[in-house]
Image: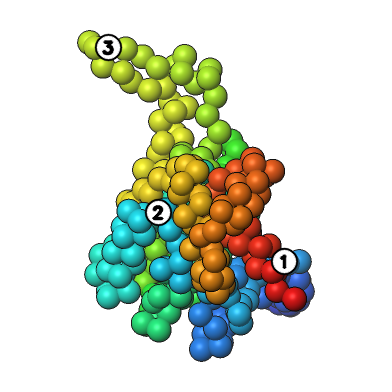
Amino acid sequence: MPNTAAETFLARAEAVLARLEELLPPPPVAPAWESAIAFRWRRRNGRAELQAIPHPQRIQLKNLHGVEEQKQRIDRNTRQFVAGRPANNVLLTGARGTGKSSLVKAMLDKYSAKGLRLIEVDKHDLLDLPEIVELIYGRSERFILFCDDLSFEAGEPGYQALKAALDGSLASPPDNLLIYATSNRRHLMPEYMTENLETRHADGEVHPGEAVEEKVSLSERFGLWLSFYPFGQDEYLEIAVRWLRVFGVAQAGSEAVRQAALLWALERGSRSGRTAWQFARDWVGLQKP
């Protein structure tokens, strides 16, 4: 009799477990890797997957201007990575519209034929990094995990997940993965005046408080920092002219174009590469019948 009761209990327990398994989301399924060079990580209704991006934005490195030093450094790092040599995770920070995300996309355009692939991940999905790593582990392609416009507020779970992925987990990151992130914040988190009050001075040395140290601890896990700065008027005009020439405008350097480009920037309160590109598109659209 005891055996019968035990068998009944085990049977019911197995039935309950089977029902629970049906409610759990299935594990992520690898995409058709050969179908695309760029992918987007998406989690909906508890289901996670890598979605192929059939037609990613193609930006050529030669068309990005005003950021020559940044171009050289990220290109060298990416070239090392694609060649299977050691390379660093990259943090691109600074003024908006100066080409941070465009540089990352330009790396995909330049090196996709050599096996480079891009995976775009939103900061809210950074908790899924271990699942993404599992999907790409051991593959021959070289993957850049791209986090655009990244910033955190205090206590966000993705913050700790990214720290562990960069450097801080017992598990070794795969050799075929790097993280490239862009942000308008140097340390990826808001900085407050009150945090400076925690700074201590000892024997002529400055020791930041714990709040500041915690914020620096994430950004310093990126081995390569690239800083971007607002453009001056001459740089902005040069970039606008270059984009117009890319679009096939013959008189790109005329005084009329110059005045129109300056007015465009004044109306938007910004002289940036993005503003110059938007002006060029508008100018070309107006000139064509």
Q: CA distance from mark 1 to mark 3?
A: 64 Å
Residue depicted at x 72% and y 66%: 286
Q: Residues within 10 Å of mark 2 (few under 14, many from 20)?
A: some
Residue 229 vertical position relative to residue 135 in the rendered view, above or below: above
Tell me the element at label 2.
Answer: loop
Residue 267 seen from this side: yes
**In which quadrant of the rendered view does residue 279 lie?**
bottom right
Quadrant of the snapshot with the C terminus: bottom right
**Label 3 vs label 2: CA separation?**
40 Å
Crowd tier of the residue under label 1, counting other residues whose Cα lies within 10 Å: few below 14, some 14–19, many 20 or above:
few
Between 52 and 240, the one lying in front of the other is 240
Select label 3 or label 2 by which is in front: 2
Asked whether the viewer can see residue 166, the reply is no
Q: Amino acid at mark 3?
A: Ala
Q: Earlier in the sequence, mark 1 or mark 3?
A: 3
Instruction: Depth check: give the residue in front, 204 or 172.
Output: 204
Mark closer to the chain start, 1 or 2: 2
Secondary structure at badge 1 equals helix
Q: How many numbered marks appear?
A: 3
Look at mark 2 in the image and give the residue it sits on. 67
The amino acid beneath tag 1 is Leu
The residue that disc 3 covers is 202
Image depth: mark 1 or mark 3 in front: 1
Say which residue appears at 32% left-offset and 74% top-offset.
82
Q: Which residue is mark 1?
A: 286
